[in-house]
Image (cartoon, grey):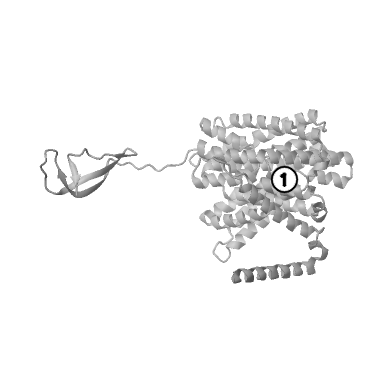
Amino acid sequence: PCVCVCVTVCLLCLFSLLFGVVWAITGHECLPGGNLFGIVVLFICSVLGGKLVGMIQLPTLPPFPPLLGMLLAGLLLRNVPYVTDAVYIDTHWSAALRNIALSIILTRAGLGLDPTALRRLKAVCVRLAVGPCVLEASVVAVVSHFLLGLPWIWCFIQGFVLAAVSPAVVVPSMLLLQREGFGVEKGIPTLLLAAGSFDAILAITGFSTCLGVAFSTGSTWMNILKGLLEVVGGVVAGLILGLFLCCVPGNDQVRMLRTLMLLGLSIFSVLSTLVLSFLAALGWKTDKAPVAAMVGRSWDVFQPLLFGLIGAEITIKSLSPSTVGLGLACISIGLVIRLLVTFLLVHFGGFNLKEKFFISVAWLPKATVQAAIGSKALDLAREEGDETLIKFGLTVLTLAVIAILTTAPIGALGIGLAGPRLLSTEETSITFTAIFFSLTLDRQVMLSDGYSIPRQKVPLLQWQWHHGCIKRTTPPPCGRVVP
């Protein structure tokens, strides 16, 4: 008890000292109402919310995704009276932290790709990345135009926000299945890792292009051409930076250098993140494991910030019940189209019916991209000061949050339940002709007619491994075994 008291006192003193140093540097920023105070409180509450939700365990079901608790923590901090005034976060800080989190999860996806499986499934990967995203974005755009009354360009902004699959749900789930050997033989985890990342990049590109058209006075075709050039430039930059990272040494002294350079370069351009991390992993080969572990720990820090920040963007009082109801209808119609299109596009990929169904279910969850770009249109509308545009931006953000709250837990539970049941594991087969195990005792056997035979080894129990099965083959007794 005395040691525990001393440790507690030391920790309190250390925290007080750290707070004093930060206060001396930042001033009111670390006090209630300051930006730094708000970020720290949001991070702590999001971590606690994720832990609490992750502890919810229902029979025969995997744990709920922690991101749901993180999102709810941010939502509560924004909508609880008095707490809202104390927890303030600058919009520029919020946008920057969300972009960093998106870069980190795409970096994890690039490091987890299997080049052999990717080479074999490249055609399916392209179909899976492009088809569901584009078709869902188009369907959501048409439906939202008639149900929500948005202008056409804002409909496509809404469509591309909702069309992206969530790397934050898909990537950790696929890495876990890959580690346990589910679907590895046919390359399903690598297929979903690569296609999910390209899907997110395509949605971000479409969103950025439509956003440029909505908020610019230039030519529409020039904005579309600019979006395409950004994609090509991102791929070329990723190739160059990836080759550069291959030359970074990887001994124990400078292993941290690889991680810092990889994360630093990834943050500058989301479009080049997947390419440069994949090329760097190819060059590092088996030495990429420590880097991947460090990137995973970075994600543990930025994941609570990402989902806590997007939850804190929603004010419940400003939500319209009709917007929520019609938004759910738009999301549901888009998901149905996505399921059907995904199932059809993987039809010629060499997968069986169970694997096609699993891929379709894994393509449902939405979280990361919606959290990263869902509020960008609203931020630009606020800078313009146009109340009509602010209303459109709030509608886009509202549907993004609804999509996260509904599809993220359903998708995570669906992957956790369907993966071990629908995907096959790679098994090592060993053939035995016949292997015998027997237990014998040195006992005297009394025959039924009263005569005895000398003491001998008597088999009491005997097992046989034959054609993959263990059979008990205890021989029939020839008499009564006595001590």
Residue closest to the eye, 262 or 2: 2
Can residue 480 be seen? yes
Q: Secondary structure at mark 1?
A: helix
- Residue ID at (69%, 68%): 12
Residue bearing mark 1: 371
**Along the line of sight, which residue is nearer the eye, 125 or 174?**
174
Amino acid on which the number 1 mark rests in the picture: Ala
Q: Tell me if 394 is positioned left or right of 242 in this view.
A: right
Q: Quadrant of residue 230?
A: top right
In the rendered view, does 61 fall on the left or right side of 158? left
Q: Nearer the viewer, residue 218 or 2?
A: 2
Image quadrant where one finds the N terminus: bottom right
Q: Residue 381: percent from the left, percent from the top? A: 85, 44
Asked whether, in this view, residue 270 is left or right of residue 438, the answer is right
Q: Is residue 144 left or right of residue 452?
A: right
Q: How many circles with numbers are drawn on the protein?
A: 1
Relative to residue 309, is residue 473 depicted above or below? above
Residue that sits furthest to the front in the current view: 450
Residue at the image point whose x is 83% and y is 33% from the top: 151
Q: Residues within 10 Å of mark 1 (few under 14, many from 20)?
A: many
Residue 34 at what x, y percent from top left? 81, 59
Residue 237, can we see it? no
